[in-house]
Image: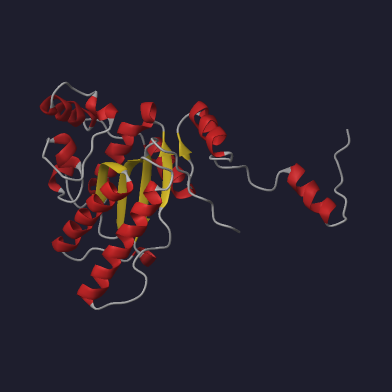
Amino acid sequence: MPRRARVSLPGVPLHLIQRGNNRSACFYADEDYQLYLDHLAEQADKHGCDVHAWCLMTNHVHLLLTPHDVESAGLLMKGLGQRYVQYVNRTYRRSGTLWEGRFRSCLVQEEAYLLSCYRYIEMNPVRAGMVAHPAEYRWSSYRANAQAEPHRLRKAHPLYEALGDSAEARAAGYRELFRYELDPGLVDQLRSATNGNYALGNQRFSEEVEQALGRRVTPGKPGRPKQEARSCAAQAGLSVPTKTH
């Protein structure tokens, strides 16, 4: 079965995840995390991506970004992957695949899901039991977003900017969001959309994305559509019985 093409639209936020091959580690020391973020910032500037949130886990990476052009995210990840894999192979005298194939992603509806996606990404170390609070984890964007710590990589989304009229007010408003746990159903929905390369949003958002891209961006029902089955059968010179009442 051919793999699903990624969904991407200029100006529409994208949640992206890339895992280590066979869930193996892709970061081994603090220097690795820092170098990855440095290269990420360079590639984001080069290819036109605004990075809003990130979390570098031991064996996978989460990013929330807005691409300026339809190819921006793909070019960013290609350039980043080449540079980081070369560094890892040279530093640790290894060879072979570091990442598990292509990255996975989903388009994110801004109004209903964007700030929840921020929280989902930055809560990863807490869900994994690595820390008790996201501020304790160095390799995520939480401190930049929730504590107003300057970071070269971070570019705030307009919805984040709307949380307050100053950096301190926005950080305080953002911290308030973390007083409540994400709904488990929303977490499952976000994971499913990202792994399937779908759109994350309501029906109206999905329909708008489908019109823009000219293809389906939500999970289909199991099995072939009847019309498709009849078309294939006709091409093979067969007939497909129709239901009679």
Image coordinates for residue 166, horizontal then vertical, percent? 13, 24
Image coordinates for residue 173, horizontal then vertical, percent? 18, 26
243 up-or-down from 4: above or below: above
Query: Residue pushed farthest front?
Result: 46
The quarter of the rendered structure image containing the C terminus is top right
The quarter of the rendered structure image containing the N terminus is bottom right
Please indicate whether residue 156 sits to the left or right of residue 136 in the image: right
Write down the quadrant of residue 108 in the picture. Answer: top left
> In this view of the protein, can residue 133 be seen by the observer?
no
Please indicate whether residue 73 sits to the left or right of residue 93 in the image: right
Write down the quadrant of residue 23 in the picture. Answer: bottom left
Nearer the observer, 219 or 32: 32
Nearer the observer, 112 or 134: 112
Q: Which residue is rendered at x = 63% and y = 46% of the image?
A: 222
Nearer the observer, 123 or 54: 54
Please indicate whether residue 91 sits to the left or right of residue 207 in the image: left
> In this view of the protein, can residue 16 be seen by the observer?
yes
Image coordinates for residue 94, horizontal then vertical, percent? 28, 77
Query: Residue pushed farthest top?
Result: 165
Coloring basis for residues: secondary structure
Please indicate whether residue 228 sits to the left or right of residue 114 in the image: right
Q: Which residue is rendered at x = 13% and y = 46% of the image?
A: 136
Nearer the observer, 193 or 151: 151
150 up-or-down from 236: above or below: above
Image coordinates for residue 17, horizontal then vertical, percent? 36, 51
Q: How many marks?
A: 0
Q: Which residue is rendered at x = 38% and y = 41% of the image?
A: 14
